[in-house]
Image (spheres, helix red, strand yellow):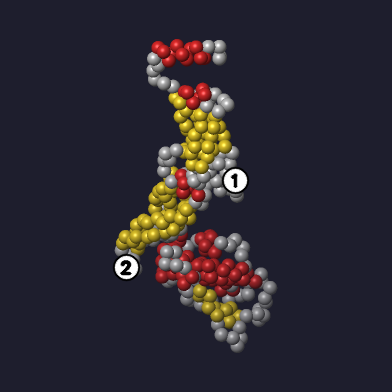
Amino acid sequence: MGNPPELYYKILNIPKDTSPQEIRTAYKNLVKKWHPDKHPPSSKPEAEARFKAISEAYEALLDQQENRAVFGLCNDGRAGGAFGGGLGAGVGPRMERTRSDDFCTRSAPGTPAREFKKVYSSGNSGGRRAFAEFSSSIMRKAPPLERKLECTLEELCRGCKKEVKFTRDVVTKNGSIVKKEVTQAVVVKPGWRKGKQVVFEGMGDERPGCLPADAIFTVSEKKHPTFKRVGNDLVLKAEVPLAGALTGWSFSFRLLSGKKVSLAFQDEVVCPGLEKVIRGEGMPIPEQKGARGDLKVKLEVVFPKELTDEQRAGLAEILKGSC
């Protein structure tokens, strides 16, 4: 027995009740898409396998429909079966049953006989073998080749172009496996997050009897000395000396974009844990064009580790009645 018809329909991506004309249309569209000459070397093995299977499925389904149409006629040489008995004796084409295992013939007076190949012919081992090779490979794909794509917070904020190099296994024409170094370009878009995946289809390892694996690069974020990313927001922690927290304090820093920002606390007391939010100075939001998160500045008051008796007395006098 050959392959189940369901597999043929699945490969051509058509329902089971598809007409011959619709089968031809589906076939033409798929062979245009998967013709090996239209694919680069990286995806050519997959294209060749799919092209082969599409052709096998197309021929098998057409043959299957033809065999069904003449099934009753081939059995007894009488007009019946799929024709519903509407043709009486002496009317319509004359059907002859042959002893061949490969086909039955239908002939009309003055016209040559037409062959109908058997879909599941026991002699068609070459076609079944080629199809079996594809049907197993189309269902299986080699495990993905996974690597990290390390990015700085600046690169994830501004966007950049990076080149990644990796080594993949490639199957040669004689079936052996060799190592090949590959270089690919990755365009990092502003706002990408840790865990974002970049997939190069069919650029992973190759294995005999399988479709080429994908190469998957997962974004990882390098630790930043100043900022910490929390979702789309940036968090900056700043230490404020106690004297500055009580009498006024200011400081400056640069954003990931390079822009300089100054914060001043002249008319307020900086309490431990005070947080200032600067709207729209966080990370870009990829899903919302032009939108950005916020920058949160968290202030930590640094207390002296020790005080002299004179300092204690002075502070006590200054702060008397302030609370």
Query: For the C terminus, which image quadrant?
Result: top right
For the point 46% across and 72% down, which residue is it?
37
* Figure check: 150 above or below 18: above
Q: From the top left corner, tell me how far across and down residue 96 is, in percent.
A: 56, 78
Q: Is residue 179 left or right of residue 284?
A: left
Residue nearer the viewer, 38 or 266: 266
Q: From the top left corner, tell me how far across and down residue 17 is, in percent.
A: 62, 63
Mark 2 burial class by Cα count in 10 Å: few <14, some 14-19, many 20+: few
Given contact means CB atoms under 8 Å apart, are the residues at marks 2 and 1 in contact? no
Residue nearer the viewer, 313 or 135: 313
Q: From the top left corner, tell me how far across and down residue 173 is, in percent.
A: 34, 68
According to the picture, the residue beneath numbered tag 2 turns out to be 174
Mark 1 burial class by Cα count in 10 Å: few <14, some 14-19, many 20+: some
Helix, strand or loop for disc 1: loop
* Figure check: 221 above or below 51: above
Query: For the N terminus, which image quadrant?
Result: bottom left
> Which of the two marks, 2 or 1, is nearer to us in this view?
1
Question: What amino acid type is highlighted by mark number 2?
Answer: Asn
Residue nearer the viewer, 272 or 145: 272
- Residue 214 visible here: no
Residue nearer the viewer, 12 or 261: 261
* Figure check: 164 above or below 267: below
Give the number of marks. 2
Q: From the top left corner, tell me how far across and down residue 317 is, in percent.
A: 50, 12
CA–CA distance in space, label 2 to label 1? 54 Å
For the point 57% across and 79% down, which residue is it?
106
According to the picture, the residue beneath numbered tag 1 turns out to be 291
Q: Earlier in the sequence, mark 2 or mark 1?
A: 2
- Residue 158 visible here: yes
For the point 42% across and 39% down, which residue is it?
225
Helix, strand or loop for disc 2: loop
Question: What amino acid type is highlighted by mark number 1?
Answer: Ala
